[in-house]
Image: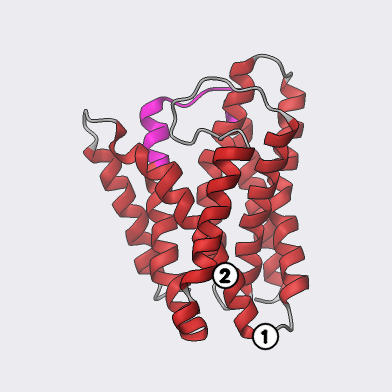
């Protein structure tokens, strides 16, 4: 992707994340709406992995395709379960104190989203990855900002500053990954994209999918929303 197009898209990712983080300072979304959004995000991430990322990297990596995917999957697993405070994208969460380790962990998570965008741009998947990352970051920003609002320990200005930093880390990660990977062997770029696919898999399976079936009353709506997310990625194959 040309720089003239790449950087405006990064600005788009930043702006959408900031807007999503700003919403809870004004009004907290209902659990029903939040579950529908998260279910749609789960479908988008799964569709991005299986219909875009894997078909792109499999011819390059061959039988080794599973290694970077597994590494990315377990990196996020360890990061979320043992290092950082979970951003509670399932929608139900008590307030957690945001320690330094948690802030570092969440920031690193966002940097990995940027790596996905950067690696994808070098393998002609930039628009698909940007779409998947942007949609995923909406509930993440809503949840993170909502946690800070519910905690009552931060002013609105400090919450917005935290969201500014959170929103900025993904574009920074994208720019750094492009600078590091540009001109390198296609195999290394495919490994980076495979690693990103693994992180997407864990986010969708470990963080988002539980939302689809946690509400038994009219839970089919969440399933439909997830299906729409997958369908969007299927249809986008003929566009991106």
Name the residue: 43% across, 50% down. 204
Front residue of this view, candidates 62 and 106: 62
Which residue has dot 2 on it?
A: 193
Q: Quadrant of residue 91?
A: top left
Residue 162 is tagged as none
- Density class for disc 2 (Cα within 10 Å; few <14, some 14-19, many ≥20) is many
Judging from the image, what secondary structure is the residue with disc 2 in? helix
Name the residue: 57% across, 70% down. 193
Q: Quadrant of residue 105?
A: top right
On screen, residue 221 above or below 172: above
- The mark tally for this picture is 2
Name the residue: 33% across, 49% down. 226
What secondary structure is the stretch in magenta mostly built from? helix
From the viewer's perspective, is 159 left or right of 92?
right
On screen, residue 49 above or below 151: below
From the viewer's perspective, is 238 left or right of 115?
left
Q: Position of residue 219 (x, y in %)?
A: 24, 35
User: Is residue 29 shown in magenta?
Assistant: yes
Res. 160 in view? yes
Q: Which residues are magenta?
A: 23-38
User: Is residue 229 shown in magenta?
Assistant: no
From the viewer's perspective, is 176 left or right of 240?
right
Q: Position of residue 178 (x, y in %)?
A: 72, 71
Name the residue: 57% across, 77% down. 190
Distance from the alpha carbon under mark 2 to that under mark 1 = 13 Å
Res. 120 in view? no
Which residue has dot 1 on it?
A: 185
Front residue of this view, candidates 50 and 75: 75
From the viewer's perspective, is 58 left or right of 231?
right
- Density class for disc 1 (Cα within 10 Å; few <14, some 14-19, many ≥20) is few
Mark with earlier residue (2, 1): 1
Q: Quadrant of residue 102?
A: top right
């Amino acid at each position: 992707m040309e720089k003239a197009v790449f950087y405006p898209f990064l600005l788009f990712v930043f702006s959408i994340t900031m807007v999503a983080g700003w919403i809870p300072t004004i009004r907290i979304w209902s659990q029903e709406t939040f579950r529908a959004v998260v279910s749609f995000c789960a479908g988008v991430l799964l569709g991005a992995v299986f219909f875009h990322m894997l078909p792109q990297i499999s011819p390059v990596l061959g039988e080794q395709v599973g290694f970077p995917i597994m590494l990315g999957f377990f990196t996020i697993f360890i990061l979320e379960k043992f290092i950082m405070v979970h951003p509670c994208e399932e929608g139900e969460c008590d307030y957690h104190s945001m320690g330094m380790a948690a802030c570092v962990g969440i920031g690193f998570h966002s940097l990995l989203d940027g790596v996905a965008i950067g690696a994808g741009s070098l393998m002609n998947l930039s628009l698909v990855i940007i779409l998947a990352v942007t949609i995923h970051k909406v509930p993440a920003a809503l949840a993170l900002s909502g946690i800070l609002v519910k905690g009552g320990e931060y002013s609105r200005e400090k919450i917005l500053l935290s969201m500014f930093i959170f929103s900025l880390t993904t574009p920074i990660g994208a720019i750094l990954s492009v600078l590091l990977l540009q001109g390198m062997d296609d195999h290394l770029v495919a490994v980076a994209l495979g690693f990103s696919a693994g992180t997407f898999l864990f986010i969708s399976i470990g963080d988002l999918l539980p939302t689809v079936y946690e509400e038994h009353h009219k839970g089919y709506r969440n399933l439909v929303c997830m299906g729409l997310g997958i369908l969007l990625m299927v249809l986008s194959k003929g566009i991106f």
